[in-house]
Image (tube, rainbow, N blue to C red):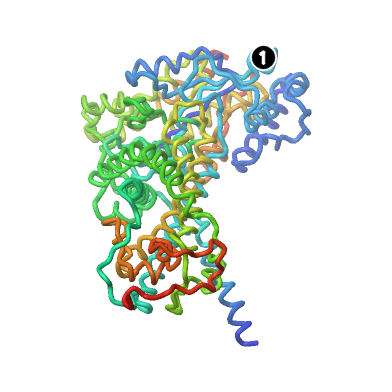
Amino acid sequence: MNSLTFARARRGLALLAVTACLAGAQPALAADAPPATSEAATLVQPGNNAATFRDVRRGENQSITFQAPADRTLIQASGERWRQLRNGPITVWGGWMLVGVFIALAAFYKLRGKIMLEGKPTGRLIERFNSVERMAHFVLAGCFVLLALSGLTMLFGKHVLLPLMGHTLFGWLAWVAKNLHNLTGPLFFVSTLFFVALFARDNVWQRVDALWIRKAGGLLSGEHVPSWRFNFGEKTWFWIGVTILGLIVGISGLVLDFPGLGQIRQDMQLAHLVHSVGAILFMSLSLGHIYIGTIGMERAIDGMKSGYVDETWALEHHAYWYETARGRKVSKDDDGTHTPAAAPNHH
Amino acid sequence: MARMKFLCDTERCIECNGCVTACKNEHEVPWGVQRRRVVTINDGVVGQEKSLSVACMHCSDAPCMAVCPTDCFYRTEEGVVLHDKDVCIGCGYCFYACPFGAPQFPQSGTFGLRGKMDKCTFCAGGPEEDGSEAEFEKYGKNRLAEGKLPLCAEMCSTKALLAGDAVEVSNIFRERVIRRGGKGVEAIGWSTAYGKGSADADTRAAAATAPVPEKTGGAQ
Amino acid sequence: MNSLRHAALLAASLSLVLLGGCKESPQVLDKKAGEYQGKVDTRPWEGPAYKGDKATWESDLRARSGNQNELRRMPD
């Protein structure tokens, strides 16, 4: 009896030492090959729980007496993966990507300068966006800016703002940012739907877009490529940015915004990864859109500000749209061979 | 001195939920929040049912701390992970990252808006004056400052849940395991909570090499 | 040939930079007495109960930890 107890003690100690040293190793480390199921294991080795904890790692066969707000999972391993992706690539690459786009635009501005009108403005105006369209744009844009700033605060504020303002002030700022983000989000989603419905018709593929792609929009050459109401660059921003990324970010954001609808932690981890990657891409593209709409091109902002653009601007940047607005006919199938009749200055 | 740790022995936990209730009562935690919970594995299956009490394990490399956007967490000298509710914004990231589902959020208002995060403090309060009204309101009792251990462990009727200095706790557990001829896998979460990071490497080494207490014979 | 080597070198260094994004910088900052990672909090033995007597606090806590071991209280 005594020697048996001694042997068991020795064995137990050795195994304990092994498990303590190799922390992180699976319980299956035990010397004897464990039976396949936890049921069989319990019958063969009543004191060995290794098989039971393999069930735990798989998240199987677990229950709880009272429903805690957390679910019945004992240990969720996916949280660690989420943490590594968020704190690693998303924060580091995402951050530098935004900085990189900003620097690239600044360099472009330095090299190319503001894209000026070539002809003289005529003073005759063409309506580009009616009041509903402008309102839809600015509601969406306003939401976007609020969401972008508050979202950036939550992802990068810890590294950028916190060292400057300290925990108390930054905690308050981040609290404002989070609540602003959560309240603006649903409005952003609804206005995205409205915006897409409003502008989808003028953003479909037109033959002349092929010419724009071939000439890269004339961005570098300075050449004016004809287009209808929206050129291919604007269409790219509309479909990839506003529509696809907007809906991805919007839907994943709603999953995070309303936590009481039955989604579990794993759903929210996935939603958060999709949301943050989508948002960083969206913000990178938006920098280009904001640049060209403000300091990048002379009078580009007029259409969104007042609703009207000068005829010269319309002719130079959207020649076919200008032609139709002037009452002339341009074939929808035109691939760029049609040249506008005359510049407005020559009338 | 101490590196504080929790340990739950699955061979002893009888799923009485006494720890859960004691914790709720001691700290008067908000409605809808449970800092500790008991999970049962293979419930109702003869011979396979195992229960465990789980709360914040006060990890060495705490994921909550790593992902917090406002850096509201801190680790005390005893290895207890605490947080500042004045800085917490209730974003829920710690809840996504935590392996044990420890962070809890009281609902505040419509929209499922999360309130400030609440979690097990190892009965160590928070960043307010020890034993003050403000500390109790936000974080519950500070038993550690009174020289006491977490109530959940101290009142556990079967002593399945152990709390305290890592060396003490591992000694108690080792003695137990040797007596019953188990394999030492009856404790759960240790490799997840304390497996990484160097903060407690020396403590673990100490636990692995500490001498076995004398009274190991006579197991009947 | 030279430009090919330059391109390879550039690709290699770029992939190293990108790989750098996968690492995680340590989150635990410096510790100072009575202040934890930039947060102010008194230590457990500095409250009204122990008034800074660390040794007593430690022995009290160790005693309570040991009390959890019923095997030591059990007769042989």
User: Residue A341 lies in what quarter of the image?
Assistant: bottom left
Disc 1 marks which residue? B220
Above or below residue A146? Residue A325 is below
Image coordinates for residue C2, horizontal then vertical, percent? 61, 87
Who is closer to the viewer here, B169 or A6?
Answer: B169
- Taking the spot 30% from the left edge, 66% from the top edge, the residue there is A310
x, y percent for residue A74: 56, 28
Residue that appears at 64% across and 41% down: A25
Residue at the spot 47% in from the left edge and 33% down from the top edge: B57
Q: Amino acid at mark 1?
A: Gln
Query: Foreground residue, A24 or A59?
Result: A59
A287 to B101, vertically: above or below: below
Between B204 and C17, the one nearer to me in the picture: C17
Question: Is disc 1 surrounded by few (<14), some (14 to 19) or many (20+) residues within 10 Å?
Answer: few
Q: Chain of mark 1?
A: B
Location of the N terminus of chain A by quadrant is: top right
Number of marks in picture: 1
Going by the image, does B108 lie left or right of A92?
Answer: left
Residue closer to the observer: C61 or C5: C5
- The x and y percentages for residue A315 are 38, 70
Q: Hey, which residue is sitting farthest bottom in the picture?
A: C2
Drawn side of residue A50 relative to residue A251, left or right: right
Residue drawn at point x = 73 percent, y = 20 percent:
A42
Is B220 on the left-hand or right-hand side of B116? right
Under circle 1, the secondary element is loop
Q: Quadrant of the C terminus of chain A?
A: bottom left
Q: Position of residue A208 (x, y in %)?
A: 54, 66
Residue A114 shows in this picture: no
Would residue B15 be seen by someone viewing this image from the given angle?
A: yes
Left or right of A58? Residue B147 is left
